[in-house]
């Protein structure tokens, strides 16, 4: 249960941070979508961008709260969708960024992104086949659950912040 809870918290925080990153730079994200899907759907870009951000917020919150299996399925779908788009553009040798990586960093697309997404998909599949972690609000009065939940949430946040700075330092070193 502890590993499943940590995986859910990590991926939930990733989704919340990427949604925040997209909200902060919605114009950049919309331009990236336009570059990814082409100009033939220009009128739908605003709706598509906001739907993606909304899904990420809902999915991230549900993963953090251990609310339902639906969040894992939506997250897997989003990871597959993002990876497919990135692989398509890598094949076309498109150099772009969407500035929407959140804790995962905002760098040019590269093959490591679909690989990282694949690892997160495997984590979500693991979560789905292991015993269900209790819904946070069902365990609100259980001290033992909180003694596990809070430290794991801080651990997940620490891992993501460390990874974010690792990506930033690597990006700076590559450009010098």
Image (cartoon, grey):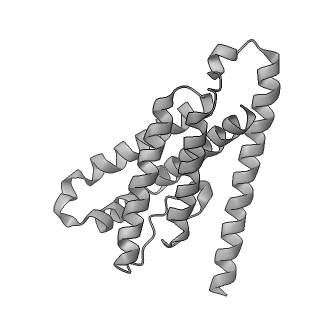
The residue under the point 27% across, 63% down is 37
Q: What residue is rendered at 34% in x and 64% in y?
A: 31
Q: Is residue 146 above or below residue 39?
A: above
Outermost front residue: 129
Tell me which residue sits at (62%, 26%) in the image.
132
Image coordinates for residue 80, horizontal then vertical, percent: 42, 53
Check the image and report above or below for 22 versus 98.
Answer: above
Quarter residue 144 falls in: top right
Residue most extreme to the bottom: 176
Locate the N terminus and report the quarter of the image it occupies: top right
Q: Is residue 158 left or right of residue 8?
A: right
168 with respect to 112 (left or right): right
In the rendered view of the protein, which quadrant contains the C terminus? Answer: bottom right
Q: Quadrant of residue 107?
A: bottom right
Q: Position of residue 10 (x, y in %)?
A: 65, 45
The residue shown at (50%, 37%) is 72
Residue 75 percent coordinates (x, y):
48, 43
Q: Residue furthest top?
A: 141
Along the line of sight, the residue nearer the viewer: 118 or 150: 118
- Left or right of residue 121: residue 92: left
Q: How many marks?
A: 0
In this rendered view, identify the residue nearer to me: 27 or 18: 18
Residue 112, image x, y percentages: 55, 69
The image shows residue 64, relative to residue 112, as above or below, that is above
Position of 74 relative to 111 (above/below): above
């Amino acid at each position: 249960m502890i590993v499943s809870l940590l995986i859910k918290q990590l991926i939930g925080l990733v989704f919340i941070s990427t949604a925040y990153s997209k909200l902060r730079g919605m114009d950049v994200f919309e331009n990236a979508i336009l570059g990814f899907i082409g100009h033939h759907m220009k009128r739908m870009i605003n709706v598509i961008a906001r739907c993606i951000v909304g899904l990420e917020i809902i999915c991230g919150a549900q993963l953090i709260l251990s609310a339902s299996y639906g969040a894992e399925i939506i997250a897997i779908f989003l990871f597959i969708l993002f990876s497919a788009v990135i692989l398509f553009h890598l094949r076309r040798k498109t150099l772009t960024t969407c500035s929407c990586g959140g804790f995962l960093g905002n760098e040019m697309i590269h093959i490591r992104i679909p690989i990282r997404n694949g690892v997160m998909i495997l984590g979500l599949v693991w979560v789905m086949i292991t015993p269900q972690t209790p819904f946070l609000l069902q365990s609100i009065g259980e001290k033992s659950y909180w003694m596990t939940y809070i430290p794991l949430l801080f651990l997940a946040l620490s891992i993501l912040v460390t990874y974010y700075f690792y990506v930033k330092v690597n990006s700076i070193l590559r450009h010098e």
